[in-house]
Image (cartoon, helix red, strand yellow):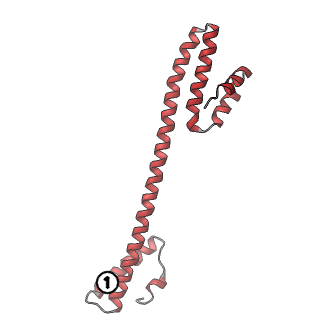
Amino acid sequence: MDYSKKLQELILAGDDKVLMDWIEAQPLILQPDIMREFKDTMAKLFEEQGLVEELELIKEFEKGTDKYEQAILDEQLAALKVDMAIKEADINNEKMIETVALMREYVIECITTKADNADAMRELSVLIIKFEKDAGRYNPENWKSIL
């Protein structure tokens, strides 16, 4: 996108704060491109005016812009990784909840039918109930047939 007209307008206005506020108000991912256009615009102005030292400063500005862009990209990548990790944790949590529910049904069935493993299942029920309580998922209605 071409921001050169807006940049020229802001540069000619001579208010650095307004210029920086405008750049910062733009979408983060576009800011490095805007800063590069700013650099090109300033380089053109310095060249027209024969300001050689200022042209050297513009080269340093480009290095800073590259670092800024990389920092933005790194931050966005980190945010995506966090989102992916949260989604994966949610999926795993849901699978765990489903597994515990199936275990609960099996344990209750073994206890109520007095299966050979009923004593072991009673011990397991204590652990499952503790897990459910710790996870904030305990519902006494689920266990009423054996409590």
Q: Which image quarter holds the C terminus?
A: bottom left
Which residue occupies the foreground of this view, 67 or 26?
Answer: 26
Quadrant for the N terminus, please.
Answer: top right
Q: Residue furthest top?
A: 50
| Horizontal side, residue 35 vs residue 147: left or right | right
81 sits left or right of 107 in the view:
right
The residue sitting at the left extreme is: 116
Q: Quadrant of residue 2?
A: top right
Q: Residue at the spot x=50%, y=43% of the render?
A: 76
Q: Position of residue 96 (x, y in %)?
A: 39, 69
On screen, residue 51 above or below 73: above
Residue wearing tag 1 = 121
Kind of residue sitting beneath label 1:
Met
Q: Position of residue 80 (x, y in %)?
A: 47, 48
- Left or right? Give the position of 7 relative to 95: right
Q: Position of residue 104 (x, y in %)?
A: 38, 80
Q: Please, which residue is most extreme toward the right here?
A: 13
